[in-house]
Image (spheres, coloured by chain):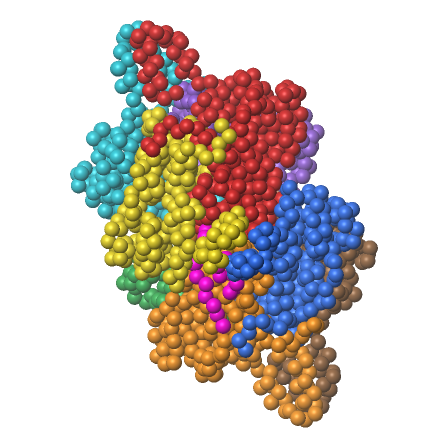
Chain colours: A purple, B cyan, C brown, D green, E red, F yellow, G blue, H orange
Amino acid sequence: MNTSDVAQLFKQIENGTLTAAEALTRLAPTQDDIGFACVDLDRQRRCGMPEVIYCPGKTPEQIAAVAKSLNDAGQDVLATRASPEAYDAVHAIIPAAAYDAQARLITRQQTPPSPIGHISVVCAGTSDMPVAEEAAATAEFMGGHVVRVHDVGVAGLHRLLARLPELETSTVVIAVAGMEGALPSVLGGLMHCPVIAVPTSVGYGSSFGGVTALLAMLNSCASGITVVNIDNGFGAAVAATRINRQSVAQPKDSSL
Amino acid sequence: MNTSDVAQLFKQIENGTLTAAEALTRLAPTQDDIGFACVDLDRQRRCGMPEVIYCPGKTPEQIAAVAKSLNDAGQDVLATRASPEAYDAVHAIIPAAAYDAQARLITRQQTPPSPIGHISVVCAGTSDMPVAEEAAATAEFMGGHVVRVHDVGVAGLHRLLARLPELETSTVVIAVAGMEGALPSVLGGLMHCPVIAVPTSVGYGSSFGGVTALLAMLNSCASGITVVNIDNGFGAAVAATRINRQSVAQPKDSSL
Amino acid sequence: MNTSDVAQLFKQIENGTLTAAEALTRLAPTQDDIGFACVDLDRQRRCGMPEVIYCPGKTPEQIAAVAKSLNDAGQDVLATRASPEAYDAVHAIIPAAAYDAQARLITRQQTPPSPIGHISVVCAGTSDMPVAEEAAATAEFMGGHVVRVHDVGVAGLHRLLARLPELETSTVVIAVAGMEGALPSVLGGLMHCPVIAVPTSVGYGSSFGGVTALLAMLNSCASGITVVNIDNGFGAAVAATRINRQSVAQPKDSSL
Amino acid sequence: MNTSDVAQLFKQIENGTLTAAEALTRLAPTQDDIGFACVDLDRQRRCGMPEVIYCPGKTPEQIAAVAKSLNDAGQDVLATRASPEAYDAVHAIIPAAAYDAQARLITRQQTPPSPIGHISVVCAGTSDMPVAEEAAATAEFMGGHVVRVHDVGVAGLHRLLARLPELETSTVVIAVAGMEGALPSVLGGLMHCPVIAVPTSVGYGSSFGGVTALLAMLNSCASGITVVNIDNGFGAAVAATRINRQSVAQPKDSSL
Amino acid sequence: MNTSDVAQLFKQIENGTLTAAEALTRLAPTQDDIGFACVDLDRQRRCGMPEVIYCPGKTPEQIAAVAKSLNDAGQDVLATRASPEAYDAVHAIIPAAAYDAQARLITRQQTPPSPIGHISVVCAGTSDMPVAEEAAATAEFMGGHVVRVHDVGVAGLHRLLARLPELETSTVVIAVAGMEGALPSVLGGLMHCPVIAVPTSVGYGSSFGGVTALLAMLNSCASGITVVNIDNGFGAAVAATRINRQSVAQPKDSSL
Amino acid sequence: MNTSDVAQLFKQIENGTLTAAEALTRLAPTQDDIGFACVDLDRQRRCGMPEVIYCPGKTPEQIAAVAKSLNDAGQDVLATRASPEAYDAVHAIIPAAAYDAQARLITRQQTPPSPIGHISVVCAGTSDMPVAEEAAATAEFMGGHVVRVHDVGVAGLHRLLARLPELETSTVVIAVAGMEGALPSVLGGLMHCPVIAVPTSVGYGSSFGGVTALLAMLNSCASGITVVNIDNGFGAAVAATRINRQSVAQPKDSSL
Amino acid sequence: MNTSDVAQLFKQIENGTLTAAEALTRLAPTQDDIGFACVDLDRQRRCGMPEVIYCPGKTPEQIAAVAKSLNDAGQDVLATRASPEAYDAVHAIIPAAAYDAQARLITRQQTPPSPIGHISVVCAGTSDMPVAEEAAATAEFMGGHVVRVHDVGVAGLHRLLARLPELETSTVVIAVAGMEGALPSVLGGLMHCPVIAVPTSVGYGSSFGGVTALLAMLNSCASGITVVNIDNGFGAAVAATRINRQSVAQPKDSSL
Amino acid sequence: MNTSDVAQLFKQIENGTLTAAEALTRLAPTQDDIGFACVDLDRQRRCGMPEVIYCPGKTPEQIAAVAKSLNDAGQDVLATRASPEAYDAVHAIIPAAAYDAQARLITRQQTPPSPIGHISVVCAGTSDMPVAEEAAATAEFMGGHVVRVHDVGVAGLHRLLARLPELETSTVVIAVAGMEGALPSVLGGLMHCPVIAVPTSVGYGSSFGGVTALLAMLNSCASGITVVNIDNGFGAAVAATRINRQSVAQPKDSSL
C-alpha cells in the first residue's frame, strides 16, 4: 500500500465514508503468521503470482503447513525442490496436490489457466533435463504455453539450426546449459526475442558445479542475454512468465 | 539462412526462376571483411539491432573503420566504453557522430526512432550513475522510452516506496546497484513486470569489484530477477529493449 | 593477571602480608589439564562467560570429559553443534544436562539467570530457523531476554514493517538470512540499535554455502552492520550478550 | 512511519484535530531530490545519525551538492574516503567544513557533541593507522569518547598486555589489523566488552588485499567477535557508536 | 555442409543431374531425435569420431537408448563415466558392449581398428591410474597404439629419466598428474613431441580437487604444454587422437 | 644425455676409442652461466627449439645479455612480452634483431626457415588480435605456414562458417577468444584437426581477466580441445609447432 | 648419480678397476617396477628416508604390494591416510606391521631408532588432534623425540604461556591449528627455534576447509613461520625431521 | 617473562635482595612507545633477532623514527620493501645505514657477524631474482653464509643437476620460483636438508600473482617442503636463519 492509497483513505475518513477502524483493516498487510512462518498472502496482488515454497531446510510438516495456509486462502500452491517426503506430507493435507518427480515440484492449482504466449525451453544436453523440466513445468503452472527443445548443444550446431524457425516465434527463450554454457551466446546471435540463460551444474572438475557455465553466460558476446542462478529453472520460468504475460497482454503504457 | 530458405532456393532454380549464380549471392552472408575485422552487417536482420562496437582493446583507428563500415551500410552506429580518443577518430570520419562522456557511448543514428514502451532505470546510489546512464542512453538509442530514478537504495526505503506508483507502469525495470546489491530483491517483491539487475563495481574490500552485488542478485529471494555482467549497463539495455519491443508490439504468436 | 596485579603482589610480599609461596598460587592460571584438553576455567573471570565446547572433531567421550571438568568446577556447560551421541555421553555423566535438537546445543546451568535486556532474533525465512534457534537459545543461556521474529524476508517487506515497533525497543538485533542476505541492510536503515548479521548456508548454486550472504552483509549500504561467520548463530549470540549486558548494566566509565 | 503512526493519524482526522491535507504532509518521507541524488533527510530520525556521503564514484560537484543539502537542513555533514578535490568543492560552499587527510574525512558539525562512553581503537601496526584513524575520527564525530592504542600486534604480545587494564574499561573495542588478523582473537579472549574487528588491506601476496585478515576474524576461536568489511573503519565506528550510546544511555527496556 | 557444398548442389540441380527433392535430403543434417536426446549421427563425418555419451545426469535407460541409436546407425559406441547400472542397461540392448570398470567406459566397436602411431600415457602416481586408464582405453578405442608408463613422478626423477628413450619416439604424450602437477613441465623440457597435460583430483587440502595441478600445468615454464579439464582423461585422449592421426597420415597440405 | 648414451661412452672408453677426459666433455650439459642467468644452449637439441626469453621481471640489460649468449652460440633469438626499451638494448648488441610491437616480440633468426604445414590462427574479435598476433608471429618464427582468420566470433556464426572450407585443411588450429570463450567449442564440433584454445583477458567484470574464457574452454562440450594459459599466444604457437612439425614430417615410429 | 660420480666411473674403467658392464649396474637407479607402481628404493639414500605410501586413490591390494616391495628391500614402511581395510591388506602380508587409527598410519620399522632432538607438537584445540597425532607419530617413526602440547589456543593465552619454558628448548616446533590459525603467530613471537605451521580443516563456513587458517599462517606478522598444506601433519613431520636431524648432528659444513 | 621468572623475583623480594620497586622495573617489558608505534626492543631477546620494519603503509618519517628507536637502543636495523624515499629519510638520521635497491632493504648493523653455516638460495629464473636477493641479503644480515644459485628451473633440468653436489652440503635451501613453482619438488626429492619454498609473483594470467606457485609448493609430492607467502624472500630468510643457527650451534637439548 503506497502513499496515494493512504491519501485516498485519509480523504474517505475525512468525508465520513470510512471509519478509522475500517481504514485500519485495509492497511493491514495480508499475511498469515503460523509461528515458524509468516505466509505472504499479498504477493499474488503485488507480483501477480502467489508466494512459492522453497523446500530445502524446511521439514515436511512445515512445508505442508505453509501449503495449507496458501490453499486455505484460495491461492495456488507451488513448492520447489520438493522431496517425495515433502509431497507425502502435503498430499495428506491437500489430496488434490500433484508431484512432478523429475522437476521436483509439488503443485496444486485451483483453476488451471489456459496457456498464453510462447515460452521455448531449450537445453544443451540430456543431462540438463531436470533443470529444464523445472523451468518448463513452472512456466506452465504460471500459465505459459511452453515448447521444449532438447539436446541441441553447440558441439553439433546443425541440430539447433534445424529448430530455428520454430524458435523464432517465441515470446521468450529459456536456454539451459552446463559445461561451457555456450548455447545462449549462439541463440542470442540468431534471434530477436529475449533470452534467459540458465547455467546447470552438469560437468566436473573446473566446471565448479556450474560456475563456469554461469560466468560464460554473464560474459556472452551476444548482447542482451540475462542470467539466473545455477540450476535455477524455477527462477528462469518466473522471469519468462513476467515477460510472456507482458508480451501477450495489451500494453497499458505504450507510446506507440 | 536456414534449411527451409535453402529449400526455397532449390525450388526456384528447378523452376528456372533463379540461376545458380544468383542463388549463390543470396546464400552469401552479409559481412564486410576489413582485414582486422569482419563486420556483421546481417545482425540487424537477425537480431533487430546492428552490431555494436565494443571499444576496449581496439585502436581508435580500428574503431573508426568499423563505424565507417556500419555507417556506409546505412546502419546505426553504437560504440560502447569509448574513450574521447576513440570519439575523435570516429568523428573525423562521421561528423554526425555524437559522444556521451558519462555513459562513454559514441552514437550515430540515421533516423532517430520515436520512443516506445516504458523502461525504468533505477539506481541505488549516485556512484552507480555512470552504469545507469550507459543503460539509459543505450535503451533510448534502441528506441525505448526511458524513465530514470536515481539514488533510491534500500538504506532509505521510503525514497523507493515514494516512486513505486510510477515504477509499476513500466514494461521492464533495470535495477542498478553496487555494494550488497539488495535493490532488485526489494523491487522484485513489489512489482509485476520483469526486473533486470545490473551489479556495479561500486564498493571496496570484499565487494570484489562488483562480485558481491552480482552474487547477491543471482541469489535474490524475490523470484524472477535476471542478471547481467558487472557494470554491464549496455547489456541490460539490450535485454530490456528486447522485452520492451515485445511488450509493445502486437504479439504475433499468442494463444490468447 | 596483568602487571598492576603483580605489582600489588610485590607490595604485599614486601609488606609481609603475603608469602612468596602464596603469591605463586595466585599467579597460577586456572586451567584443568585433562590430557587431550586444557580446560580454561579462568574464562568466566576474564570474559564473563565460561569456555564453550565446540563439538565437531571431538569424540563423545572427549566432549563429556570437558563438560565434566567445567561442571565439577561449578561452571555452566554449553556445547555447540552437538550430535545426539555427544549428548548421550554428556548426559550419562551429568544427568541434569539438557539437549536442544534443533539448535544442536547441550546445556547445563547451575542457576538459570533471570533474563535481562531485549535481544531480537529476526530471520528471513523458515529455512534459516536452525541457525536462528542456535542464536536464540545461546542468548537465553547467557541470560538475555530474547524475542523471536520469523520469516520476514525482504521479498515481502510488509511482514517486517509490521514488526518494526516491537523491534525498535531492542538493545540489539540479530538478523539471520541466507540467499542474498539483504535483511540486515533493510533493518539497519530503519533502526537505532546495533545489528549483528548472521549469514546462513541456505541457498544453492552461486550462494556458495552462504558466501554470497556473508559478502552481501559485509558490504551493506546501511552502515553499522557487523557480521559473524556463516551459520554462526552461537557467535552472534555471544556478541549480542556482550552488548546486551553492557546496555543494561549501569555503565562504569561513562563521561556523561 | 509505521502502521501505529498511521492509525494515530486516522484517529486525529476522525476527531477533526487534523485535516487530510495536513496528515498527508506528515506522511511524506523527508527527502531532498536534487536530481542525481535523493538525500535522505529522515535518517537522523530513524537511525540516530544523518546520511553519510560515500565519495568514490561521485564528482566533487555532486559531493558538494549533497553536503549542502544536509547542511541546509541543519544536519551534520560527514563525507568518507574524500579526496582533497572533494574537500575543495565542499569547502567552497560550506566554509566551516574541515578535512582530515589521514582519515580522508570531510566533516561539518553544527554543534559538536560532548563525548560519551569509552570506545577503544586498537591497531596492530603502524601501517594500519589510516583505517584506525577513519574509525577513531568517525566515532568522535558521532559523539564517542575515543582512546587510541597503536602498534600492539601479536608478534610482541607484551605491548598489548601492558595496555590491558586501560582497555578493560571500554564500552566497546574496535580492533584493526591486517596480515593474519589475529589481534581480535587475542583481545576477545581477554575481555568482557564487545569487540568489533576491522580487517585492513595491509599485507601482500596471499593476504589478497585484506581477505586473509577478514577470514581470520570471521573464524576467530574467541567467540563474540563481529566483523566489518576490509578497511571499513567508518562502518566499525558506526557500529561502535550504536553500542556505545546504548551502553551509556539509561536503558529503556531492561528487565533488570 | 558448407557454402561450397551447397553451391555444388545448385550446379547439379541447374544441370538437371539432381532434383530439388534429392538435394534436400543431402542438406538434411543427420540426427536422430529420440525425444529427450537428439543424437548427432553426423559427428563421425565432421570430426572423425562418433558422438560420445557422457553418462552423469542421464538415467541408465536414456544412456541405453542413445547407445542403441548410434549402434543402429552402424557407428561405434563409447560411453564415459559409466556406472555398472548404466552398463547393465546398455548390455541388455547391445550384448556385444563391453565395460572397463577402472576407466568407467562402455564400448562397442563394429570393427576394431588396427592401432596406429604411438601415444604415451604417463602418470605421476598410482593414485592417478583411473584417469590415466580412461585416457589410454579411449585412445585405444579411437585407434591409437598406446604405451603406458606408470608412477614416475618428479619426487624420484630417475624413474622418469630411465623411460626417456622410449618416450622420445611418441607422436604425442599424455601426462597425468595430481598434487602440484609438475610432471608435464619436466617432460616438456626433455622432448620434441606435443605434450597434453591432464590434472587429476588426487590430493587434499589446498589441492582443491585438482585445481592446483590444473593451474600449475597452465603455467608451465616448459613452453608448449596444453591442458585439459581436471580428471579429463577422455578429452586428452581425443586431442591425442587428433594429433596422432595427423602425425601418422600422409599430410595433405604440407609445403615441405 | 640418457643412460644408453652413457653406456655407449663406457663402451668407447673400454675400447680405447675415447679417453675419460674426452668422455667428460661430452657429459657436460651445454649451458652458458652468465651470472644472473644460466642460458640453456642444449634446449634446441632436446626440444627442437632454442630457449626463449620471457622478458617481464628482467632488466633490458639482462635481456640483451641472454640474447647475446644465444646469438653467439649460433642459435635463434626470440624474446616475448618485450618492451621497446628491451628491444633497444638487444638491438644495440644484435643489430639484425627485429621488433614486432603488436606481438611484443624481439626476433633474430640466423636462417629463416621455409614455412611448412598449415597453422590457422582464428580469433573471435578484433580486441583479441594482440594475442593472436603473438601466436601467429611465434609460429612463423618457428617455421610454420600460418593463416590468420580474424573477428569470427559466435555472435555472428555465418562469418565463421564462411571460412570453414579453408580451416578444414589445417594441420592444427589455434582459436583465440575472450569473454565467454565459445569459439573453440564451435570449431571443435566442426573439424577433424587438433584445436588449441587460447583464452584472452578481453572482457570486464566477471570475465575476471580471462578466467571465464579459460574455464569455458576447459569445459568445452566439443571433446578434444586443449587449452593454454590466458593471453598465452606464445605457448599455443609452440604447441602448434610441435603438432605441425609432427604432422608434416615423415613419422618415424608409426605402426601403419 | 651426478656428474662427478660418473666421472669417477670413467676413471675406474680407464684404470681397468671396473668393467663397462659393472659400471652400468651402478648407473641403474634403484627402483622396483611392479606394474602399477615404480617403487623408489633409492629415496632412502637421496633424502634420508624411504618412499612413503600415500593411500588415497590406491586399492588395499596396491598398498600392500608397495609395502611388500619396500619391506623386501629391507626398508621401513610408512603408509599415510590409511583405512582399516588398507591395514588389513598390509598386515596379511607383513604381520609385523602396526596401525595407528587416530593418525591413520600403517608402520613397519625394521629397527626402531633411538629418539633424538626435541620436536614439540603443539595444537590449538582438541579437534585438531588427529592432525597433530599424524605429525607426532610420523616424527617419532623418523627418529625424533617428540613432546605433545594439546589445546593451548589463543583464546586462553595463559595455557600456552605456562608451557613456554618447556617449548623454548625445542629444536623445532610444529604448531597445529584450525579456524583463524593464530597460534603460530603467537608462538613465533615468543621463541628462537624454527616453527612449522599446520593449518587444519577444523572450522565451518568461511573457514573453507582450512583455507582461512592456511592463509593466516602464510601471512603471519611473526616472521620466520613456514607452512605446509592443510591437515598435512605428515609433511610437517618430515620437514621437522630434516631440521631436527640437522640440529642434532655434528654440522659438516659450518664456518663457525 | 614467564611464571618461573616471576617466582624468582618473589623469592628475591622475600629474601630482601630485591625491593618491590626494583622488581617492577624488571617486569616492565622493554618497548619504546613513540606515539604512532610501539617499538619492540625485547624481540632480540625473545626471538634472537630485532624487530624488523615492514615499510609499506608507513611514511618515510615513521620508518626513520622506528629505525632511530632501534638504533638508539643499540640494535641492528633492517627495513624491508623500502623505497628510495624511505632510505633517504633513514639515512638523514643514521648516516651509516645502507640501501640495497634490488632487494629493497635498508640495513644498519652495529657489528657485522661472521657468517656461519650454509644457506643456499636457488632461483628458477632470472625474473625471480629480486625475491631471491631479498632472501639472500636478509640471511646474510642475520649472520648466515649464503650461496646463490640462479636460473636453474625445471625446463632445463641439467642446469640444476650440475649444481647438486654443492647444494647437498647446505644446512638449508631456499628455493625461489614463480609460474608453476616446480623447483622445490625436484629439489626436495634429491636432498636431505630442509627446503623452504618461496613462490614468486612471476607469471601472468592464471598464475594469479603467484597463487599458482604457492599452491603447487603446498602440494609438493616431495614431502618435507615448507612454504612462505608469495614474494616473501624475507620470511624465508628468517626461517632459514632459525634453522641454520640451530644446525651450526652445539645442540643444547639433544638426546643423542
In-front residue for pair D134/E116: E116
Q: Is residue A66 above or below residue D52?
A: above
In-front residue for pair C8/G225: G225
Queried whether the magenta region covers residue C204, the answer comes back as no
Asked whether, in this view, residue A238 is left or right of residue B96, the answer is: right
Q: Is residue B95 above or below residue B19?
A: below
Queried whether the magenta region covers residue H147, the answer comes back as yes
- Tally of numbered discs: 0
Which x, y percent locates residue E189? 46, 48
Q: Is residue G8 above or below residue E239?
A: below
In-front residue for pair A179/E156: E156
Which x, y percent locates residue H211? 48, 53
Q: Is residue G208 visible?
A: no
Residue at point 43% right, 22% down? A158
Q: Is residue E252 visible?
A: yes
Residue at point 62% right, 56% down? G43
Asked whether, in this view, residue A183 is left or right of residue C118, the answer is: left
Q: Which residues are magenta?
A: H145-167
Residue at point 26% right, 51% down? F97
Asked whether, in this view, residue E72 is left or right of residue B211, the answer is: right
Which x, y percent locates residue F148? 31, 35
In-front residue for pair E107/E115: E115
| The quarter of the displayed image where residue H251 is located | bottom right
Which x, y percent locates residue A110? 59, 24
| The quarter of the displayed image where residue F116 is located | top left
Residue at point 55% right, 30% down? E140
Of all residues, the one furthest to the bottom in this rendering is: H16
